[in-house]
Amino acid sequence: MKKLLMTLALFAAPTVASTVMAVQPSLAATTISKLGDLTDMQKIVADTLALVEAGKTAEAELRIADYEKAWDANESKLRKLDTETWRKLDDMSDVALSTVRYPTSTTDEKKKDLSDLIRLLDNPML
């Protein structure tokens, strides 16, 4: 009976884990990150990326400003939690902010830098 239960547990665990990740992809990153829950900032960057993809450059610039305000408002708290991780995110944030705002940046450059920032926000330990 123990072997049967262990076998079932081994087969069920990956299914449960993949279901949780499909429903809440940032859950693992949030629990791993020493910086805490970054989902609000992830959403802002994702919104910005969607606006860039839709060709709404002016709206994307406004939305990325929301990210900058949120990042700056949490700077001292986040930096105290994990200075090294905060620095990586801060550097990547600066790149994405500049690219979105720079008038001659291409859509592909904006998409790449925003996607890179989203990936780092999803898993700051990279």
Image: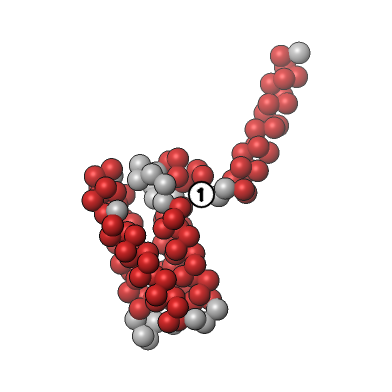
> Who's the residue at 29% across and 49% down the image?
78
104 to 87, vertically: above or below: below
Quadrant in which the N terminus appears: top right
The secondary element bearing badge 1 is classed as: loop
Image coordinates of residue 11 in percent, x first then y, are 70, 32
**Circle 1 Cα neighbour tier, 10 Å, few/some/many (<14 / 14–19 / ≥20):** many
Give residue 16's quadrant in the image.
top right
Q: Is residue 105 left or right of residue 82?
A: right
Give residue 97's quadrant in the image.
bottom left
Image coordinates of residue 103 in percent, x first then y, are 36, 85
Residue 87 visible here: no
Number of callouts in the render? 1
Image coordinates of residue 31 in percent, x first then y, are 45, 40
Return the residue at label 1.
Answer: 26
**Looking at numbered disc 1 in the image, what kind of residue is underneath it?**
Ser
Q: Is residue 2 left or right of residue 67?
A: right
Image coordinates of residue 126 in percent, x first then y, are 40, 50
Q: Residue furthest bottom?
A: 104
> Who's the residue at 44% across and 64% down the image?
45
69 to 55, vertically: above or below: above
